[in-house]
Amino acid sequence: MKKNIGTQKTGLLKGLILITKISLASGVSWELSKMLGSNHPYLAPLTVILSIQETVQHSAIYAFYRIIGTIFGIAVTIFIISHLAINGWTIGLLLLGGMLLPVILRVHKTIIHQVALTILLVFVFVHKTNYYVSDRIKDTIIGALIAIIIHMVVFPPNYVKEAQQTLRQFGFHLVQLLEKTAHWVNTNCDPVKGQHLRTDITKLLQELHQVQKDFRMAEKSLKLNPFVKNKKQLLKQNEQFLSQLKTGYTYISNILDTFSDWSKTDFISKLDQQQWTTQLQMIGAYIEKQLKEEPANYQDPTIFKSGLDLSSISIQINISSELEPYRYQLSLYNDTLKFIQSLRKGQQ
């Protein structure tokens, strides 16, 4: 509950910062356009409103696309505008012709949209007002630059903290899954509980995808950000930690079917169950310990531990010396057999 309230407050604060930036940048760009002699100063804040995105990098890319699309749209329109009357058919044909070349050149779809918007506005307004073409180019550039500068200087977006939070949540849920699996193994791998574990694994996979998405957003938010300090190093170290947790997820999702199949035979002993229970609990305990220690290190990357320290985890499981030379072959055999069985089930 507290976490949800904290998330809502963070979202509200980010929203207030965003609208403050848009308002400030719009006012500055309007006044700057007027100072530079524009007769259409509203074009500058229009670019500001459209350009400010989630991150500074996104904003810069969008602003660049808008400038390119504006220049291209004007170039297409200006040469033939005096030979066409203003009506729906001429506008439609002009848009078709103007957007065809960008599509052929396979440019970004944002440029295509800006080309269409520029063609429409230039075609209509150039007949009614002077200097629209020059103002369109100049004010677009002014709006784009002001949007990027203010977005970059005034509380630039930084999503590293959000990525850390989703990473920790994923880690604790992985620990819970390890504990549940350990208990399941120790209680003879009940089929009903096994199905519940598979559901948990599917949910955890969706959570992993969200963590990866948040990390990509965090990485983008640090680009063109002048106040990142040690955030890049911190994010890189968290990515190493995430990589190890992903390995843990792959491990637990792979062994579930093996335990389920093994329990159906007469070859799994109570000692085997106890040993594997201890092994899974030990892995989960070490991951949990690492997760609980990390918050103290978030603000100082120099003392951040690079991933999980698993050096003191002992192997609880042993195989006979006769089977040791064949462990790789047996592992490959078991993985291949499970894969072929899954293919056969898919055809039934």
Image (tube, helix red, strand yellow):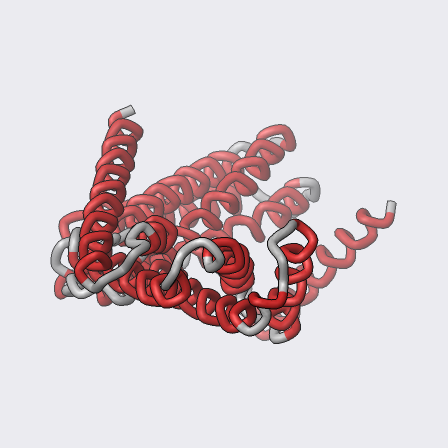
Q: Against 144, is 79 above or below?
A: below
Residue 231 place in picture, x, y as percent: 21, 61
Residue 248: name its quadrant.
bottom left
Residue at the image point whose x is 51% and y is 49% from the top:
252
Q: Nearer the viewer, residue 110 or 35?
A: 35
Residue 79: name its quadrant.
bottom right
Can residue 102 be seen here? yes
Residue at the image point whose x is 34% and y is 54% from the top:
43
Q: Nearer the viewer, residue 60 or 276?
A: 60
Farthest right residue in view: 348
Q: Is residue 220 left or right of residue 203?
A: left
Q: Against 330, is 275 above or below?
A: above
Q: Against 60, is 215 above or below?
A: above
Quadrant the C terminus occupies: top right
Q: Nearer the viewer, residue 307 or 125?
A: 125
Residue at the image point whose x is 53% and y is 32% from the top:
187
Q: Is residue 21 left or right of residue 326?
A: left
Residue 138 place in picture, x, y as percent: 32, 66
Farthest top residue in view: 1
Q: Nearer the viewer, residue 49 or 83?
A: 83
Residue 152: name its quadrant.
bottom left
Residue 54 place in picture, x, y as percent: 34, 51
Residue at the image point whose x is 12% and y is 59% from the top:
300
Quadrant the N terminus occupies: top left
Can residue 323 be seen here? no
Q: How many marks?
A: 0
Residue 297 place in picture, x, y as percent: 15, 54
Q: Against 6, is 244 above or below?
A: below
